[in-house]
Amino acid sequence: MRVLVVEDEPKVANALREGLEGEGYEAVVEHTGEGAFFRVSTEKYDVILLDLMLPGRDGLQVLATLRGRGIETPVLVLTARDTLEDRVLGLDHGADDYLVKPFSFVELLARVEALGRRSDTMVKETILRVGDLAIDLMSRTVSRRSKPIFLFPREFQLLEYLVRNEGRVVSRAMLLQHVWDLHFDPSTNIIDVYVGRVRRKVDGQQAYPLIHTVRGIGYCLRAPG
């Protein structure tokens, strides 16, 4: 598995590279956003470790540009910014996971392995449908009644998980584990924040809702009848 480490502090970057290589990964280091964008545009990587505080083009700008160009390589953001707003901002720009410094290398490895498995998974279905909702897994687009709905990458992943579990009640812990690759934290409301966003986009001004709240448990996506 090839991992791109984007970190401007040489000591941190070298430590990450040596640790990853010691675990059998091929690790490449870039110290600037411009260099990272060039690397990802011309070479294939399975996972990107991206520091946000970079000289020149910062991590969020790099991330937004990659996603805007259709590059879906899983990205693990590494940052000292630890507020919920910072996490949501990073995820909104297309990050797949978020790790706050300082962190343990064991936890980093677990996150990298999880993202690597996601990168290796080949999706067999092309389009998933529930009622008048259609999700194109190849183009990563969503529509209802043939009208396009814009979703950020994490919102798309959340909706995809709900659709794949059509008719089943999905708990908040399940969403946190399968969409964010995190263990359940009862103090976080990030699931409710994201479900609310997706619901407004998917169900707003529609003939009938698809996303339903199951009080005290979680959510269920189902069409009438």
Image (cartoon, rainbow, N blue to C red):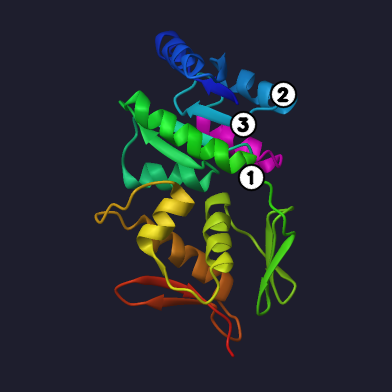
Q: Give me the C-alpha separation between circle 3 and circle 2.
A: 10 Å
Instruction: Mark 3: give few (<14), some (14-19) or many (20+) Cα within 10 Å.
Output: many
Question: Going 37% across and 55% down the picture, which residue do you hit?
Answer: 190
Position of residue 63 measured from the top left corner of the image (x, y, whole percent): 57, 35
Quarter holding the C terminus? Answer: bottom right
Please tell me whether the stretch drawn in magenta is mainly helix, strand or loop: helix
Q: Is residue 120 magenta?
A: no
Disc 1 marks a residue whose amino acid type is: Thr
Position of residue 87 measured from the top left corner of the image (x, y, whole percent): 39, 43
Question: Which residue is farthest left?
Answer: 187
User: Disc 3 designates what residue?
Assistant: 46
Image height check: is 162 above or below 71?
Answer: below
Residue closer to the observer: 34 or 217: 217
Disc 3 marks a residue whose amino acid type is: Asp
User: Disc 2 designates what residue?
Assistant: 43
Disc 2 marks a residue whose amino acid type is: Glu
Question: Going 38% across and 34% down the picture, which residue do you hit?
Answer: 99
Question: Does dot 1 land on a helix, a strand or a loop?
Answer: loop
Q: Which residues are magenta?
A: 59-72
Question: Does dot 2 land on a helix, a strand or a loop?
Answer: loop
Q: Give me the C-alpha separation between circle 2 and circle 1.
A: 19 Å
Instruction: Mark 2: give few (<14), some (14-19) or many (20+) Cα within 10 Å.
Output: few
Nearer the observer, disc 3 or disc 2? 3
User: Disc 1 designates what residue?
Assistant: 121
